[in-house]
Image (cartoon, helix red, strand yellow):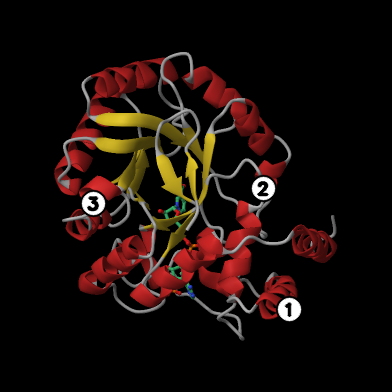
C-alpha cells in the first residue's frame, strides 16, 4: 500500500480507502441484504491489508454505516483516519435532506460522534452544498466546532473551486471528495488543477462506478428501484448511469480494453480502474466500497499497482474514442 499526505493536513492516508455507502443497509440491495458481521469483517480485512481511511456518512442507512464503522474500528482506532460527513442526512423514514443551518450541523456532528463512538472525527466533510441557506453561517459554525475539538480537519464534497474559495474564508479546507472514474471525468478540466494549485487533497468516489468497473459483469446488471422501499432498492443504476441499456455497449467496450491491460499485468480489472484514477497527480486516495473481505483485500492490493504511463495513455485514448471526445 502506498500512503500520501492529505492536502494541507498532517494526515497520511492510504491511496485506496474504504467507502461505506453500500453497507448502510438500505439503498444497495442488489447483491442481497447487508450482513453487518460481513461488513465488519470486510472493513477489518481492508485495515489489515493496509487501508487506513474509512469514509462514512449518516445518510448511509440513517446512521447505520457509522455504527458499523464504530464496531469495525474497535482495537484499530489509533491507526484509522475516520472520515464522515455533514449537511446531508436521512430522517427516520430514510428520506434524504441537505441542510447546513448551524443548529442542524451541530446536531448532525454530535450524532456522528455518538454513533462512531470517537472523541473526535479526523476528517469532517461538507457532503453537498446547500444553496438554500447561508454559507457564511454554516462555515462559521463549522470553524467553532473544529475549535471545540469535535473534528480535526474539514473537507468538502461535490464542491467546485469557486465554492471552495468562498468556504476558505472561514475554515481551512484540506480535501475535496468528488466523483472520478474512467466513466466520469468531468473534474479533469478545472477542479483537479484547482486542487493541485491550492494544495487541496482529493478523495475520489465512484472510481469503480458502483462495481461495474471491477469487470465482474459479463452481462448488463439490472438493479431494482424497489418501488419506494429503500430496503429493496439498489441506487446504483440511478446514481451511476452506466448500467442502462443505451450505455452498456460503451461501458462494455471500455471494460474490454481494461481487461486487456489487466491481463498484460496479471492484475484484476478492478486494479486497473483504481490505478487509472490514481494516475492523476491531483489524486490522494480512491474511496472504494466493499461488501465482503475478499473485495476489500482485492481493492487494497490495487494500492500497490501503478499503471505504467503507456498503459494509462492507451486506456485514456480508448476512453476518449469510445465516448467520442
Ligand atoms: N460524497 C459523495 O457524494 C459520495 C457519493 C457516492 C459515494 N461516496 C463514497 O464513496 C464510496 C465508494 O463509492 P460507492 O460505494 O458508491 O461505489 P463503488 O466503490 O464504486 O462500488 C462499490 C461496490 O462495488 C462492488 N465491489 C467492490 N469491490 C469489488 C471487487 N473487488 N470486485 C467486485 N465487486 C466489487 C461492491 O458491490 P456488490 O458486491 O454489491 O456488487 C461494492 O459495494 C462510498 O461507499 C462512499 O463512502 C461519496
Q: On the rendering, which quadrant does ligand 1 occupy? A: bottom left
Counting residues from the start of the chain, the first of labels 2 and 1 encountered is 1
Asked which secondary structure carries label 3, the reply is: loop
The picture places residue 218, in percent across and down from the top left corner, at 61, 86
Counting residues from the start of the chain, the first of labels 1 and 3 encountered is 3
Task: Tell me the residue that label 3 is attached to.
Answer: 63
Task: Tell me the residue that label 2 is attached to.
Answer: 280
Q: Nearer the viewer, mark 1 or mark 3?
A: 1
Counting residues from the start of the chain, the first of labels 3 and 2 encountered is 3
Crowd class of label 2 (few under 14; some 14 to 19; many from 20; radius 10 Å): few
Q: Kindly indicate whether the residue at mark 2 contacts the one at mark 3 (C-beta within 8 angstroms).
A: no
* Residue 144 appears in the picture as rendered: yes
Q: Nearer the viewer, mark 3 or mark 2?
A: 2
Front position in the image: 6 or 91: 6
Query: Is 309 left, or right, of 290 in this rendering?
Result: right
Task: Tell me the residue that label 1 is attached to.
Answer: 260
The picture places residue 319, in percent across and down from the top left corner, at 77, 62
Asked which secondary structure carries label 1, the reply is: helix
The quadrant in which residue 275 appears is bottom right
* Residue 91 appears in the picture as rendered: no
Q: Residue at x 53, y 78 (%)?
A: 222
| Number of callouts | 3
Height in image: 20 above or below 158?
below
The picture places residue 90, in percent across and down from the top left corner, at 29, 48
Q: CA distance from mark 3 to mark 2?
A: 33 Å
Q: Residue at x 54, y 62 (%)?
A: 304
Front position in the image: 254 or 25: 254
Q: CA distance from mark 2 to mark 1?
A: 21 Å
> Which quadrant does the C terminus fall into?
bottom right
Q: Residue at x 34, y 79 (%)?
A: 32
Amino acid at each position: 500500500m502506498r500512503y500520501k499526505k492529505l492536502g494541507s493536513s498532517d494526515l497520511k492516508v492510504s491511496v485506496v480507502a474504504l467507502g461505506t455507502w453500500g453497507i448502510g443497509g438500505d439503498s444497495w440491495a442488489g447483491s442481497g441484504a447487508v450482513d453487518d458481521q460481513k461488513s465488519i469483517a470486510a472493513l477489518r480485512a481492508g485495515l489489515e491489508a493496509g487501508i487506513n481511511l474509512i469514509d462514512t456518512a449518516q445518510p448511509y442507512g440513517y446512521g447505520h454505516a457509522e455504527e458499523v464503522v464504530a464496531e469495525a474500528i474497535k482495537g484499530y482506532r489509533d491507526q484509522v483516519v475516520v472520515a464522515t460527513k455533514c449537511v446531508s442526512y436521512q430522517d427516520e423514514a430514510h428520506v434524504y435532506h441537505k441542510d447546513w443551518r448551524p443548529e442542524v450541523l451541530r446536531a448532525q456532528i454530535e450524532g456522528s460522534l455518538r454513533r462512531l463512538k470517537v472523541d473526535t472525527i479526523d476528517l469532517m466533510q461538507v457532503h453537498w452544498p446547500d444553496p438554500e441557506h447561508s454559507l457564511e453561517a454554516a462555515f462559521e459554525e463549522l470553524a467553532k466546532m473544529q475549535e471545540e475539538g469535535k473534528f480535526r480537519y474539514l473537507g468538502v464534497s461535490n464542491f467546485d473551486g469557486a465554492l471552495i474559495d468562498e468556504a476558505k474564508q472561514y475554515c481551512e479546507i484540506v480535501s475535496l471528495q468528488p466523483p472520478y472514474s474512467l466513466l466520469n471525468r468531468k473534474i479533469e478540466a478545472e477542479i483537479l488543477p484547482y486542487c493541485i494549485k491550492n494544495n487541496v487533497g482529493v478523495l475520489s468516489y465512484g472510481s469503480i462506478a458502483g462495481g461495474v468497473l471491477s469487470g465482474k459483469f459479463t452481462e448488463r446488471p439490472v438493479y431494482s428501484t424497489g418501488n419506494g422501499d429503500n430496503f429493496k432498492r439498489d441506487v446504483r443504476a440511478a446514481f451511476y448511469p452506466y448500467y442502462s441499456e443505451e450505455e452498456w455497449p460503451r461501458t462494455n467496450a471500455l471494460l474490454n480494453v481494461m481487461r486487456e491491460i489487466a491481463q498484460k499485468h496479471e492484475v484484476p480489472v478492478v486494479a486497473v480502474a483504481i490505478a487509472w484514477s490514481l494516475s492523476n497527480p491531483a489524486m490522494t486516495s480512491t474511496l472504494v466500497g466493499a461488501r465482503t473481505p475478499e473485495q476489500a483485500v482485492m481493492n487494497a492490493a490495487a494500492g500497490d499497482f501503478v499503471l505504467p504511463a503507456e498503459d494509462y495513455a492507451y486506456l485514456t485514448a480508448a476512453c476518449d474514442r469510445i465516448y467520442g471526445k
